[in-house]
Amino acid sequence: MEIVGDMYQPFYPNPDAVVYNVTIPYQGGIPGGIYDGKMIEISGSVPYGAHRFEVNLNTGFDPSSDRALHISCRFDQHCVVRNSYERGCWSIEERQGSFPFSAGRDFTLMIMAEIGCYRIAVNGQHCWEFNHRLPMERVNSVSIDGSVQIHKIEFIDRMNPYRPSPYNPPPIAICPAAKVDPGFMPGVRPGICPVPSIPSFPSVPSNPGTCTIPAYPSFPPTTTCVIPPPEQLPGYIPGGSNLAPVYNPPIPYAYPIYGGLKSGMMIYISGRPSASAHRFTINFQNGTAPYPPPDIAFHFDVRFFSRSVVRNSRCNNTWAAEENLVAHFPFQPSVNFDLIIRVEFEKFMVAVNGQHFVEFRHRLKPLDRFDTLYIENDVIVSSIRFA
């Protein structure tokens, strides 16, 4: 929260650090340049029949500028080539490693600059390292071209306390497949292991052109399992948030908030409504039992048919009075959005695409009994993060 004059103003990330609905080919500047700890997160999708696409970190805006990092995703060769380009010549290619892209699927590509190398992750999994061949301080632009659709490019300062880093090492959840807990709604996958999908990079630098992937358990997106209590997880920190980011979760989705909601917590949800979206819903509720229905501290219901956003609460299976007045309707089908929900002592504050949108005063307390974030209906979520 910032104080402006005598008025309190909500703090939201700088909207200039985010580019939405990118036109391909694309070239744009990097706010603040590249330095140790700077991250670039690119969210997009690969169309069916894609041949290849590329992402470049450049030292200028001219097509002949040097390229400190060239990432070429080649579906025809089923590989991702990393290289650099200097003084009109390509250097030595690096091709080893997995091919994490699929035609017709969304992806999140993350590039983190460190003193010795760039570290690259796709969909939360560390994939490659690329040792610096050109000084990263020379890099001032990013370009993207080829068979790809880009929904969002975000430039992230890892040291920003208001922006959750996608590169914080998570606790390791040992979570074998199990039967669905009968307390969960039909269609909800309780505790789909989000933890192992977060990139955790080895602390010891690998040899040039190689990549060491952490030996964390990896589960397919549809694995259903029951997460043990947080205090039983390796790496659990008493009093810490212990809330790992989630990438590309299935919808409907229930995320357990260990310890419940707390004042000062910020939740970042990035995604886009489906092409024929009718509505989508975000609830902060106490559990997911089908009966009795859970109490809901904050119900955020985006309705395209009426171009309204309804806010409400529910207690003992009874809805309270709706709030539906908004200055504008910021959502569009197939258009990416960034939603930020800040929990304050007296209210929830909501921003969309970096702009303050609505407030909703608390009706149900204590907040910490609301231990589940639940998302359903016509939305594709690319990431959920807590800070």
Image (tube, rainbow, N blue to C red):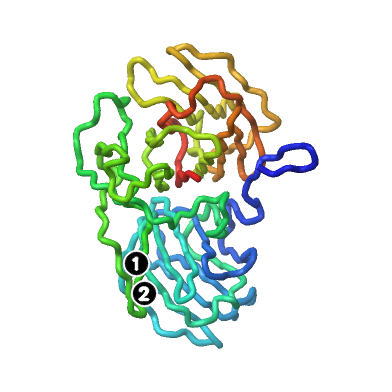
Tag shown at residue 329:
none
Please indicate whether residue 53 sits to the left or right of residue 309 in the image.
left
Spatial CA span between label 1 and label 2: 7 Å
Quadrant containing the N terminus in the rendered view: top right
Q: How many marks?
A: 2
Residues 251 and 180: in front is 180
Q: Secondary structure at mark 2?
A: loop
| Identity, as a three-letter code, of the amino acid under mark 1 | Pro
Query: Percent x, y for residue 367?
Result: 49, 27
Q: Is the residue under label 2 in contact with that under label 1 (CB below 8 Å)?
A: yes
Q: Secondary structure at mark 1?
A: loop
Q: Residues within 10 Å of mark 1 (few under 14, many from 20)?
A: few
Please report the residue visible at 53 percent of the width from the left and 41 percent of the height from the top. 266
Q: Which residue is mark 2?
A: 205
Please report the residue visible at 46 percent of the width from the left and 44 percent of the height from the top. 384
Residues 336 and 195: in front is 195
Please report the residue visible at 71 percent of the width from the left and 30 percent of the height from the top. 327
Query: Percent x, y for residue 273?
Result: 51, 38
Query: Percent x, y for residue 6?
Result: 79, 37
Please indicate whether residue 220 sits to the left or right of residue 7 in the image.
left
Q: Residues within 10 Å of mark 2 (few under 14, many from 20)?
A: some
Please indicate whether residue 231 sits to the left or right of residue 346 in the image.
left
Tag shown at residue 202:
1
Please report the residue visible at 40 percent of the width from the left and 35 percent of the height from the top. 259
| Identity, as a three-letter code, of the amino acid under mark 2 | Pro
